[in-house]
């Protein structure tokens, strides 16, 4: 049919082909949003507050950046994120995006200590597993992490890897976003 394009071409040419296309699109949507889909990293930027910001700040401190862990993403946190991003050949815009997160999180296990462990313990506690936030990777931290991993379909290793961090970051409500101060 002249002048008809796109989906109309498929429908007019072969109704079964259109049905197959619609089914394929529905399956793609379901797999992207269903329970098998990987959790997404949150976007964290200047003006954000509370738990996601505290996590970013703990992790920046673990990487040697001097920021206060106060749960407010202000100019100092943004500047530290920019330095971190520039040092990892990322777009240095101060916004923690999906490409920044896997480099910002660190593998945490029984040999780990300090701010990266505090970030992990903070997230476990916020995910509903009462965890002391000490900065020391204790047997209780390993147990809580393994429990979280098992309940989220991850290998219950008791070690925080990128998939565990991503699941922990997705286990909470969205970030409170306000205007930059």
Image: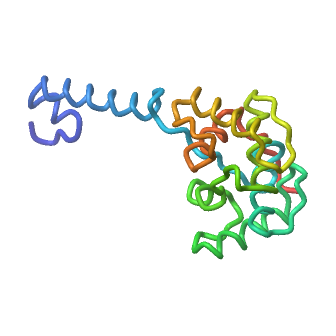
Please give the name of the residue rendered at 56% of the width and 59% of the height, measured from the top-left corner. 99
Task: Tell me if residue 111 comes above or below residue 39 in the rendering.
Answer: below
Please give the name of the residue rendered at 81% of the width and 29% of the height, measured from the top-left corner. 130
Please give the name of the residue rendered at 85% of the width and 66% of the height, measured from the top-left corner. 76
> Residue 28 appears in which quarter of the rendering?
top left
Please give the name of the residue rendered at 69% of the width and 34% of the height, measured from the top-left corner. 143
Specify the quadrant that holds the C terminus: bottom right
Tell which of 121 and 65 is nearer to you.
121
Left or right of 11? Residue 125 is right
Left or right of 66? Residue 37 is left
- Residue 18, given in percent of the width and then of the height, sits at 19, 28
- Residue 158, given in percent of the width and then of the height, sits at 63, 40
Tell which of 2 and 53 is nearer to you.
53
- Residue 37, given in percent of the width and then of the height, sits at 46, 35
State the colouring used for the structure image.
rainbow
- Residue 136, given in percent of the width and then of the height, sits at 82, 49
């Amino acid at each position: 049919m002249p002048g008809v394009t796109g989906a109309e071409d498929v429908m007019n040419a072969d109704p079964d082909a259109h049905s197959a296309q619609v089914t394929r699109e529905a399956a793609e949507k379901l797999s992207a949003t269903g329970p098998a889909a990987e959790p997404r990293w949150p976007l964290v930027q200047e003006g954000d507050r509370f738990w996601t910001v505290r996590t970013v700040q703990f992790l920046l401190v673990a990487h040697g950046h001097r920021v206060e862990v106060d749960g407010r993403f202000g100019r100092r946190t943004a500047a530290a994120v920019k330095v971190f991003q520039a040092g990892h050949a990322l777009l240095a815009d101060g916004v923690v995006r999906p490409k920044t997160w896997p480099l910002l999180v660190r593998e945490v296990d029984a040999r780990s200590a300090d701010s990266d462990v505090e970030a992990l313990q903070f997230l476990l506690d916020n995910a509903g597993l009462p965890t002391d936030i000490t900065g020391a990777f204790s047997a209780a931290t390993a147990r809580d992490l393994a429990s979280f991993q098992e309940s989220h379909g991850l290998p219950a290793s008791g070690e925080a890897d990128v998939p565990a961090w991503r699941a922990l970051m997705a286990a909470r409500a969205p970030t409170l976003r306000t205007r930059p101060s």
